[in-house]
Amino acid sequence: MTAPQPKRLADYTPYPFRVDQVALTFRLAPCATQVLARLDLTPQSPGADLRLDGEGLRLLALRLDGHALPPADYTLTETGLTIAARALPAAAFVLESEVEIDPAANTALEGLYMSGGMFCTQCEAEGFRHITFYPDRPDVMAPFRVRIESDLPVLLSNGNPVAQGTGWAEWHDPWPKPAYLFALVAGDLVALRDRFTTASGRSVDLAIWVRRGDEARCGFAMEALKRSMRWDEEAYGREYDLDVFNIVAVDDFNMGAMENKGLNIFNSKLVLASPETATDADYERIESVIAHEYFHNWTGNRITCRDWFQLCLKEGLTVYRDQQFTSDIRSAAVKRIEDVLALRARQFREDQGPLAHPVRPESYIEINNFYTATVYEKGAEVVGMLRRLVGDDGYRRALDLYFDRHDGQAATIEDWLTVFEHATGRDLTQFKRWYSEAGTPRLRVTEDWDGSRYTLTFTQETPPTPGQPVKTPRVIPIAVGLLGQNGDEVVPTRLLEMTEASQSFAFEGLAARPVPSILRGFSAPVVLERETTQAERAFLFAHDTDPFNRWEAGRSLARSALMAMVGGAAPDPDLIAAYGRVLADAPADPAFGALCLRLPSEDEIATALHAAGTPPDPAEIHGARARLTHAIATAHEGALQAVFAAMADPGPFSPDAAPAGRRALRMACLGLLNRLDNGARAERLCDAATTMTERLAALACLIEMNRAAGALARFRDGFAHDRLVMDKWFMVQVLHAAPDLAAETAAHLAALPDFDWKNPNRFRALMGGLAANHAGFHHASGAGYRFYADWLIRLDPINPQTTARMSTAFETWPRYDAHRQALMRAELGRISAQPGLSRDTGEMVARLLAAGG
């Protein structure tokens, strides 16, 4: 077999035909669905062959302008259909095809497949080619009319319903869309219905479709949808543009959710919620993803991507929009910290390893492998930087121009940046490097004080990344404030704009040397390197008026202490005292207090040690973190008990930000107190808890104390019928298992009858839990690596997309000691050597192995 060839941004050419109309008929049958397609086509480049993508299709008929096309006029391969130019009319024509597909056998969950007796689709990025022959690329946009024939009671597709009868329904989407936004669902479903009135007075019918028995858990998702629709009108001036908006919850889904026009398909875990079954984190995630997929209606659907290299054009922008939404309706400070924690944990790690790539890649082999934190989260950071540089008014003018100029088009990053230049008068040539260069810039800071002038000098450097050894200076917006020695703010936040490799900024007329608060609000996705004392960080932790930098100072103190403890030092008494001040202040802002009490993760300490030139020892890191937790709990036991009691829910459950923040702080206290009472308090709470947030946190505490057997059995007896809650049961056991028991625990759970490994949620719960157990996955025995690789090998022939994404658990292998490196390389080599390895997984493993030279 020849190696798959990369696709390159530089090779883009427009499709040589325009698709004017699409009409599809589906005759649904689990093992033999027939798809009839009628395409109205107009040639745009005379003499071009007509190339249509298609995989796994059995061709039954092919007609051109009503006449059967002779086999001599077309070529059929495993990847598509090509009709010779000589057989095509010079003017507009109609191509009709009939194919047969097997949804029941589609375990890859791309295209049309079955989930629990339901027909559903997932077409992004290139799933439509598994349904019918079509130019499966995002720059080919057309209106769709769809007829569904089935004896199932609910038949849904994109757009508005136009006709229905016994055993059939027809839908029409008047807005041109690419094939990746096509959706179809058919099943025995029930709906929670509501209505939304737009700002202009139009009425929109809303429905969330679920399996029978789940309808009582849709109320929060529906309210989140209506909040999203109103927010998009108020914040961006965007109204919904169809008569109906449908959401369907599906159990078997490779992604979180999909923004198909008018028919969003969601992983059921991001729709269904009740206090007994969903944690506060689940509620917030549901709210955020509902908003994200709805916001795609304009930033993704009305304006889509010219090609998949422009994926960040829709995803980065829409992530930024959903972050704004959550910040507005919850706590902006807490949301910013949580977003940065996720960015550093996932995207910074990506930038620092073999999978590093630009926000807009230059090439790819399998596009599914580029649905990454770089495209999504770093893409959102780039949008945020643009907004900071042009200001709120400039941002709004640019977005209005973007919607006006490109509505109904497939756009590019160049189009996006041009509207900002035209709306604000700025030259963004240098800023564009954020899209084209991989890697996280290192921002070094030195300072000078001459008695009245304070000068900050910044130097930026971006380390080499695969394929990009040389980096150029970027535009970096640096938000800076200056504090006086008494904690007062002597210079309020000022946005400095760095454009050179090294650049100085002076502050005049100061009476005394200030304490700088740099990169406020995390104004750019960089690593800030500045020599500072423990005393200064403690000062900022106590006094900084910027909540992000106050949290950052405490985080830095804890990280330094843990790194020293890995080297044998005792817990820092000043740090322990600082946690006492956090506890005293925490009840005033519980959500922020909970974040400040959370110690850096073991993976974060491993990253910091590696950056300092020390190969991290996961066992030593785990032990140091446990010792510091115990020291903090011992020093502040009384305060922790008082806050734990004070944060108990005073009334009926609410998923809103304020009560969720109280529960977060209470569970943070529980995690610390757990070290002192050997899980006694957690055991009482686990039995008495009325919310899943408390029950799951208490269960995790018991697992850490190795006294969870009874609680786990009771949990399983109570929730065995609930597939989403049982995913939590699988994950929590391996995530919190002792390092020497993690692989053994995972193997025990994988042998259970209800470990449905073909379901992506269940597979991710168990394997993702193991990968996130830092000391357990990286145990020196290599048992975690072997177990994980075994299951990737088993899953790859069934679901390559999920396999490839989960292979990233090995992406940090070069930072560990030689023994662990050898173990991980061996497992990657074993995966790579599998006969018939999928293109998805093969590309990922090859990139991972390439890190070793």
Image (spheres, helix red, strand yellow):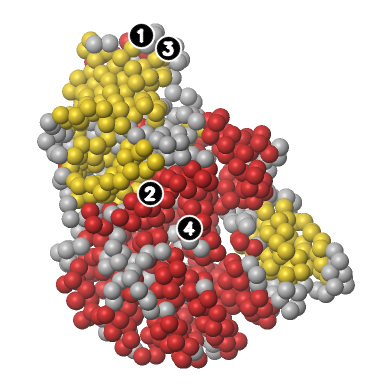
Q: Which residue is mark 1?
A: 89
Query: Looking at numbered disc 1 in the image, what kind of residue is underneath it?
Result: Pro
Task: Compute the Cα span from label 4 to label 3.
Answer: 56 Å
Q: Which residue is mark 4?
A: 329
Whole-percent x, y for residue 531 in the image: 70, 72
Please tell me which residue lies in front, 251 or 586: 586
Query: Looking at numbered disc 3 in the image, what kind of residue is underneath it?
Result: Gly
**Residue ID at (55%, 64%):** 333
Query: Looking at numbered disc 2 in the image, what kind of residue is underneath it?
Result: Leu
Query: Looking at numbered disc 4 in the image, what kind of residue is underneath it?
Result: Ile
Mark 4 or 1: the one toward you:
4
Indicate left or right for 223 with 584 as reference.
left
Q: Is residue 122 visible?
A: no
Residue found farthest to the top = 90
How many callouts does the rendering have? Answer: 4
Q: Which residue is mark 3?
A: 47
Mark 1–mark 2 contact, CB under 8 Å? Answer: no
